[in-house]
Image (cartoon, rainbow, N blue to C red):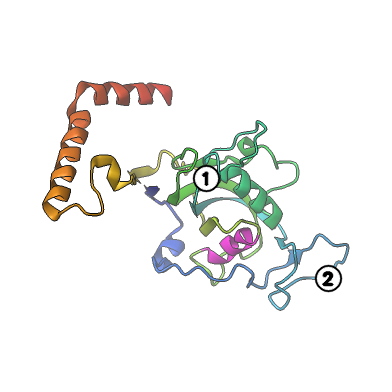
Amino acid sequence: MVVSSLRFPLFPWIISNHTSNLRFSNPRILPQWSLHCSSSSSSTVTESNPDQSVQKWESFRKKKVVMRVGYVGTNYRGLQMQRDESSLSTIEGELETAVFKAGGIRDSNYGNLHKIGWDRSSRTDKGVHSLATMISLKMEIPANAWKEDPNGIALANYVNFHLPNNIKVFSILPSQRSFDARRECDLRRYSYLLPAEIIGIKSNSSASEIDHHIAEFNDILNTFEVGVFFLILCKFLLLGNG
């Protein structure tokens, strides 16, 4: 599992009203923006009619935004989009489709993340989960997108309406045009889980046996941390990432 932390250069009025107490509300309870449905009807859909099969806001202008995303990656090939044919989708593939269906990507830009300046704070491989990945893009947004919603949860819920249950957008906030999700990330924290049996711990192990196996395993990890192999691996990864 990966967690990313960003230096977040948002507008002052966003910063002054920001709170870390984010609540994830029902994605079908949508705010009263002007929406378009896929049917031929020209009537406006509002919060009083939240059960339409397709929910799409009306674009007012394009704005660079940052999405905070979390996901369970078990059934995905990883985060980054891959255009080759496969039975498994990617997280970004699902996100792009959901943002498009919500009205955040024009038809002419759909299918080309480069056109909308798509960038991410970190990447994960097949089967890896994330608690907080930041994704920046130039999104088509409705008028008064953050009015009475400084945490950007309403926009997020529009996108979540089109996402599977194992992917969630927690917030969508405005950012400066110069914002770079990868370069602005100043912390990436990874958690690795493995069965206790791998290091010799069993269900009937005593406390002293558990402590012994954990200490032994930590000694092995320390060897890689300070050893030459670890340094060479780091250099190789840096070179590989350009």
Span colored in magenta: 152-161
Point out the tag, 1 or 2, that comes first from the N-terminus.
2
- Residue 89 is inside the magenta segment: no
Which residue is identified by label 2? 43
Which of the labelled discs sits on residue 241, or is there none? none
* Residue type (three-letter) at the residue carrying disc 2: Ser
Residue at image x 68%, y 50%? Answer: 100
Q: Residues within 10 Å of mark 2 (few under 14, many from 20)?
A: few
Q: Position of residue 80 (x, y in %)?
A: 54, 38
Q: Which residue is mark 1?
A: 177
Q: Residue at x 79, y 70 (%)?
A: 44
Side of 208 where 158 appears, left or right: right
Q: Is residue 170 toward the left or the right of residue 84 in the image?
A: left
The amino acid type, in three-letter code, at marker 1 is Arg
Residue in the foreground of this view, choosing between 19 and 175: 19
Callout 2: SS: loop
